[in-house]
Amino acid sequence: MLSHLIDFCLNNRLLVIIVVALVAFFGAYNGLTIPIDAVPDMTNVQVQVITEAGSLSPIEVERYVSYPVESTMSGLPNIEEIRSISKLGLSVVTVVFREGTDIYLARNLVNERLADASNSIGNYGDPQIGTLTTALGEILQFEVRGEGYSPMQLRTLLEWDIAPRLRQTPGVTEINSHGGFYKSFEVQADPDLLAGFELTLSDVIRALDQTNMSAGGGYIVHHGEQRFIRGEALLKTKEDIEQVVVKTREGGVPVLVRDIGEVVIVPLTRQGVVTRDGRGEIVTGMVMMLRGENSRQVVEAAKDSLREIEAAMPPGVEIE
């Protein structure tokens, strides 16, 4: 048998050379393009439904959020298991499908039940499908730092400037932000002033909700031109919030937010901090890879994007 194979190769040298060249070419091509991971991804086919539940305790989250969402997801085809984790203000329901189920079909099936899940939990939260990634999707971590910038300013840059641009990188599905402070505007109402104007906190909240919006008013024709009418009332600065009308007294005198309290910029309450190399608190971002992508290629593309983003940052801000 071996002698026949040797004779065949000697008699068909050109064919053998072509076959060997093709095998070498496709081998090299696959070696360069095959997805590479540090360890094999053994994650099963699962879809997570994440619900932020404000300040509810774990017991209330389980009763009013996790259980209704689990019940709503029951009965979907090819389901293998439904489990949940209930924490302070957070519910994570994991729907596990049978092996071989297409992940996009699974996400579509869960998405069809989201409306029912939202109705079942009422005002306790708004359920959302988790990102299309896996347990091994954390592929790149970077730090945002800048001399003279506060942790709140760096976190704001990461959330509203860096992360949206970085999500446009092929293969990147999400950017998780850690560290720093999340910027918020807080109205610190004075109880005595509220009582003096015969107002309650509910009146202040209602006024802020109804004011923070834009509206369209159609159009008018002026000198042969069509001009659109817009009502812009989005709250952008502390001064805008201070000018919100809470109540109108007799004689048309308005009661503004600044008349019943003070508007301050404060950080939201946080659960922990991020430190590095003993330098104290830092602000970091974690790049999450899309399921099934080549981690090596996505990491290189993300690094290139970060270099471009860093060049457009304010003076002194660095991304490492």
Image (tube, rainbow, N blue to C red):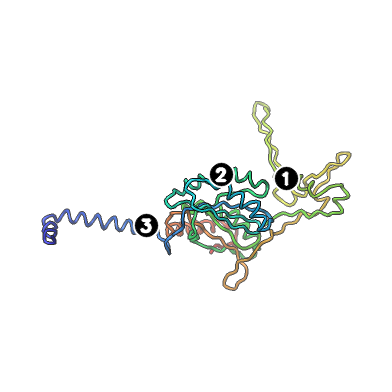
Q: Tell me the CA gap for discs 1 and 3.
A: 51 Å
Q: Nearer the viewer, mark 2 or mark 3?
A: 2
Q: What residue is shown with label 3?
A: 34
Residue 291 shown left or right of residue 63 in the figure: left
Residue 313 shown left or right of residue 222 in the figure: left
Q: Quadrant of residue 250?
A: top right
Q: Amino acid at mark 2?
A: Arg
Question: Within 10 angstroms of label 1, few (less than 14), some, or many (20 or more) residues?
Answer: few
Q: Of the numbered discs in the image, which one, if any, rests on residue 135? A: none
* Residue found farthest to the top: 224
Q: Amino acid at mark 1?
A: Asp
The picture places residue 107, in percent across and down from the top left corner, at 50, 47
Q: What residue is shown with label 2?
A: 113
Query: Which is more N-terminal, label 3 or label 1?
Result: 3
Q: Amino acid at mark 3?
A: Ile
The picture places residue 184, in percent across and down from the top left corner, at 69, 55
Q: Secondary structure at mark 1?
A: helix
**Image point 11% across, 61% down: which residue?**
3
**Image point 60% across, 46% down: which residue?**
117
The picture places residue 47, in percent across and down from the top left corner, at 52, 51
Using the image, determine if residue 311 lies above or below residue 275: above
